[in-house]
Image (cartoon, coloured by chain):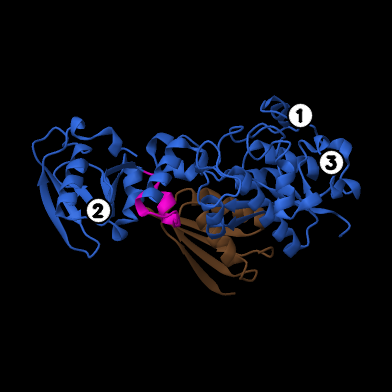
Amino acid sequence: MSEHTVDAKRLLCPMPVIRTQNKAEELAAGDILTVICTDPGATNDIPAWCRINGHKVLDILTVDNEITITIEVGGLG
Amino acid sequence: MSTQPKAVALISGGLDSMLATRLVMDQGVHVEGLNFFTGFCVEGHTHAIRKQDKTKPKRNNALWVAEQLGIKLHIVDVIEPYKDVVINPKHGYGANLNPCLDCKGFMVQKAYEWIQAHQFDFIITGEVMGQRPMSQRKNTMPVVQKESGAGDLLVRPLCAKLLPPTRPELEGWLDREQLLDFSGRSRKPQMALAARLGIEDYAQPAGGCCFLTDQAYSKKLADLWQARGNREYELDDIMLLKVGRHLRPKQHFKIIISREEGESRFLEGYRKQFVHLITTSHGGPLALIDGDVDASDIQLAAQLVARYSQGRSADIVDVEVNRKDGSSEVLHVTPLSPKDIPEQWYI
C-alpha cells in the first residue's frame, strides 16, 4: 500500500475528477489517494465517481475553502 | 467479439443519451459511458460559482446519469485536441461559435479510438434525427459516421429505425425492432419513454451543454480572439469568459469584474497572473486586468472598479492595485458614473 496526492486546487469540476481518475488508473488496489481541491462540487462528484468505479471514500475534510478527499483505491481502478 | 457485446455510450448528462444507453443495456449489452471535457462544457459547478445559481444541484450530470444507469463512466480531458475543432471547423459554426457538426464528428472519432483501445464492439449516442439544426439532420448524420471513422459501428438507438441498419443490428448483437424511430424537435417522445422506463429525474431536456452555443459567451470569445489577433486560447482563457462582467475600455486591455462573492473567490485564484484591483475603502468586487497596461489605463480601471463597489456614490474610493511582480499601491479615485461608461465597452 502506498500513499499519493493529487493537487486539484482552483480546478473546476470535472477536472478534479479527471485528475483523480487518471492518477487512480496508475495505482494498485489498497493504495491511498488524497485529493486536494477547492471546487465544492468535488464533494459530490468525487464520491459519485468512486461509487461508480469501485473506490472507497475514507474521509472528506473541508477547511476554509480547501477540501481534502481521501480515497482507498479499489480493485477496479 | 466476447460473448456479451460491449458498447460505449457518449454520456452528456442529458436525457437522450441516458435513454439511448438504457435501451441498449436492456438488450443485454455491457455498456460503459464516455464523457468528454472540452473546457466549454456547461457544468453545474460553473453556475454554482454564482450565488444566484446556488439552487441548481451541484452535481456533474454525466456522473449522475452513469450512477443512475449503474455503469462506469470514463471522463476524458480533450481540451487540447478540441482546440482545432473550435478554431478550424470544417463545417463552420452554428448561430454562435458552436461547431456542432465538427464537434460530434470529433467526439465519435474519439469514442471510436477508445473502443479500439479497450476492445469494445460499438458506440452509442443519444442523437435524434432532426433535433439539432447542424449535427442531427438526415443528411449530416452520415457525415459523422464517415468522418469519425466509426462507420456502421455507430448506433443511434433513439432513431435507428430511420437509418440504415448498423453492424450491431446486422450481426444480431442488437434487435433492430427494439430500437426507435424518434425524429424532430419535440421532447414528448423522450419524456414518454423516460416515464415508461421509470426514469423520473433527469437534467433539463434539451438544455444546452456547451457554452459555445451561448450568444453572450461567443461574443466574449470572439472579442478575445480579435484583441489578441489570433484564435489561440488556453483553458484559463475560456474559463474566465464564464465568470464576471467583462469590459474593454481600450483595444489593448479588458477588465473582468466579479459580480458577487462567489465570483470574487474564483477570480482570486488568478491574482498572480493578472494585475488585480480591490476596493479598500468600501466593499467591492475583485477585478483582473487582461492586457499590458500603463498608469492611465490602471487609473481608468480603478475608476471602473469603484463604480461597481459600494462606494459608487462616494466622492473618492480607495482602490488597491496589485501588480504581477508583487508590488502594490492604493489609488484614490472618483468612481465613473454610468453615463461615462459607453455601451460598447461591455463585451
Q: Which residues are magenta?
A: B227-243
Residue that carries the numbered disc 2 in the rendered image? B276
Quarter of the C terminus of chain B within the rendering: top left
Q: Residue B135 location in percent, x, y?
A: 65, 40
Chain A palette colour: brown
Residue pointed to by mark 3:
B164
Label 1 belongs to which residue? B196
Side (left or right) of A55 relative to B274: right
Q: Is residue B27 depicted above or below A29 in this figure?
A: above
Q: Is residue B44 left or right of residue B302?
A: right
User: Residue at (78%, 51%) from the top-left corner?
Assistant: B151
Callout 3: residue from which chain?
A: B
Percent coordinates x, y for residue B213 in the rendering: 52, 39
Task: Tell me if I can see residue B30 in this picture.
Answer: no
Between circles 1 and 3, the one closer to the viewer is: 3
Mark 2 and mark 1, same subunit? yes
Question: Looking at the picture, which amino acid does disc 3 mark?
Answer: Pro
Q: Quadrant of residue B292?
A: bottom left
Query: Mark 2 packing: few (<14 Cα in 10 Å), some, or many (20+)?
Result: many
Q: Compare marks 1 and 3 and give the one earlier in the sequence.
A: 3
